[in-house]
Structures are given as structure tokens and as C-alpha cells.
Image (spheres, rainbow, N blue to C red):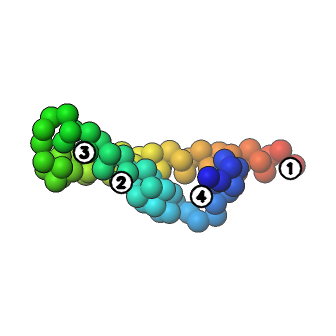
Amino acid sequence: MKPAKELLAELEEKGFLFSVFYRGAFCWGLPFGLLFSLAVSFFEKKSFITAMIQILPLALVLGAIFGWGLWGVALLQGVKQRQDKD
């Protein structure tokens, strides 16, 4: 795993859409949704596919919100580092 400063620099460099869709929805929301639907299917005795269809859209939206917040933190840290250099 990358150190926090490198991750934030990468997010600032690659842009908003990378942060929201790749880091948020794909890297956070998708695994969370799959694991949560696995837990729901195990504890509620539902089909995994049924649980995944119900949970995955919400997990992807929440992942995108997480990526948006990560993008904001990356911007704030970039501003802070530039102010420290001056």
C-alpha cells in the first residue's frame, strides 16, 4: 500500500474522475458491496445474486461519495504543502 502523501499526490495528478470512479466506486464500493452481500446471503439465507443486486448500487454510490471526499482531502493537502513551501 502506498503512503498517504504519495496517494494524495497521485489523486491530485490524475484528477477528479479517477478519484471518484476508480478509487471510490471501483476500489472501495465494489469490494464493500460484494463482501456485504456475501454476509447478507450468509446470515439471512438469501441467494448471493439477489443480495448483490440489492446492495451493489448503493455500495457504488457510497464508494463514489468516498472518492469525492478523498479528492477533497487531496486538494486540501496539496494546498497545504504549497503553502508550507512558500
Numbered disc 4: secondary structure: helix
Distance of label 2 from label 3 (alpha carbons): 11 Å
Numbered disc 2: secondary structure: helix
Query: Compared with residue 18, is residue 66 higher up or lower down, i.e. above or below?
Result: above
Sequence-wise first label, 3 or 4 = 4
Query: Compared with residue 41, is residue 30 higher up or lower down, i.e. above or below?
Result: below
Residue labelled with disc 2: 30
Distance of label 3 from label 1 (alpha carbons): 46 Å
Q: Alpha-carbon neighbours of circle 4 within 10 Å: few (<14), some, or many (≥20)?
A: many
Distance of label 1 from label 4 (alpha carbons): 20 Å
Q: Alpha-carbon neighbours of circle 3 within 10 Å: few (<14), some, or many (≥20)?
A: many
Distance of label 3 from label 4 (alpha carbons): 29 Å
Whether label 3 touches label 1, CB < 8 Å: no
The residue under label 3 is which amino acid type? Ser
Whether label 2 touches label 3, CB < 8 Å: no
Let me know if residue 75 appears in the view.
no
